[in-house]
Image (spheres, rainbow, N blue to C red):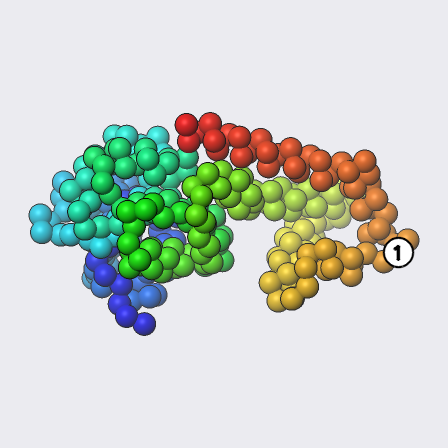
Amino acid sequence: MTALPSLLLVGAGRMGSALLAGWREQGLTRAFVVDPSPQALALAAPNVSVLADVALLPADFMPEAVVLAVKPQMAAEMLPAYARFGPKAVFISIMAGKTVRGINHMLGGGCAIVRAMPNTPAAVRQGITVAFAAPQVSHSQRELSGRLLAAAGEVAWIEDEAMLDPVTAISGGGPAYVFLLTELLEQAGLDHGLPPDLASLMARQTVIGSAALLAASPEAPEALRVAVTSPGGTTAEALKLLRADDALPKIFKAAIQAATQRSRELSA
């Protein structure tokens, strides 16, 4: 595998740090990280320099890619300072809710922009990132962007930027829904008198093991669910309640719709 070209990471929070760790494993040549937080200094290495401000970058530094991993509400203030990299670099944004059009405007126009939505399992290289490339992005820039995003897990591309709204609702927020399920399983154990340590272990390992089985099996989730559900058994009795009057499917559909609509509102 060829070494990665020079990179600039703007923002070293959880997602930015996860990406940087993956790039190091891929053979990182040279990277600068711009982040004013003291914690970001821990990311410094022989081939990684951490700076508190973009103004401290070497004047001759021209990265192949600029990864924007800052909070969306900071974009309007921060992005204009990175416009000088526009002629050469591809900008990869993982800022939720910021459209390609809006990012391009903040950068002064004419930039090659990839907008991506990763999720938090990126921290353990098990994430899914869905990305959209603007028309100005070249084939080589798209390939580089895919390689950089793959440092966090799987990557899928879409041709319609509007699809990032349901993507945000489903995969972006998806880990929270799984964690909520884990909380509910643990609480159910506590409600039935199980010791806290056992209730926690059971809930966590059930979710972890089920995900591992799903990853290893060629069967559809529905088939795996049916395999666990013996007719007339305990699981069937529980599912009867969860699916009564289509209750769980209805509330889940409504929840995803609400999250999708919120994503559209934030993108406006």
- Left or right: 92, with 228 as reference point: left
Residue 73 location, quadrant:
top left
- Looking at the rendered image, the quarter that the N terminus falls into is bottom left
Q: Residue furthest left?
A: 59
Q: Residue furthest bottom?
A: 1
- Left or right: 176, with 230 as reference point: left
Q: Which residue is rendered at x = 34% and y = 45% of the image?
A: 134
Q: Which residue is rendered at x = 72% and y = 60% of the image?
A: 224
Q: Which residue is rendered at x = 82% and y = 52% of the image?
A: 235
* Image location (x, y in percent) of residue 236: 84, 51
Up/down of 197 relative to 163, above or below: below
Circle 1: element type: loop
- Looking at the rendered image, the quarter that the C terminus falls into is top left
Choose between 216 and 190: the one closer to the eye: 216
**Tag 1 residue:** 231
- Left or right: 223, with 83 as reference point: right
Up/down of 209 relative to 1, above or below: above
* Image location (x, y in percent) of residue 29: 22, 63
Mark 1 burial class by Cα count in 10 Å: few <14, some 14-19, many 20+? few
* Image location (x, y in percent) of residue 59: 9, 48
Up/down of 176 relative to 143, above or below: above
Amino acid marked by disc 1: Pro
Asked if residue 14 shows in the view, the reply is: no
Q: Which residue is rendered at x = 32% and y = 46% of the image?
A: 135
* Image location (x, y in percent) of residue 204: 63, 53
Up/down of 127 relative to 176, above or below: below
Asked if residue 108 shows in the view, the reply is: yes
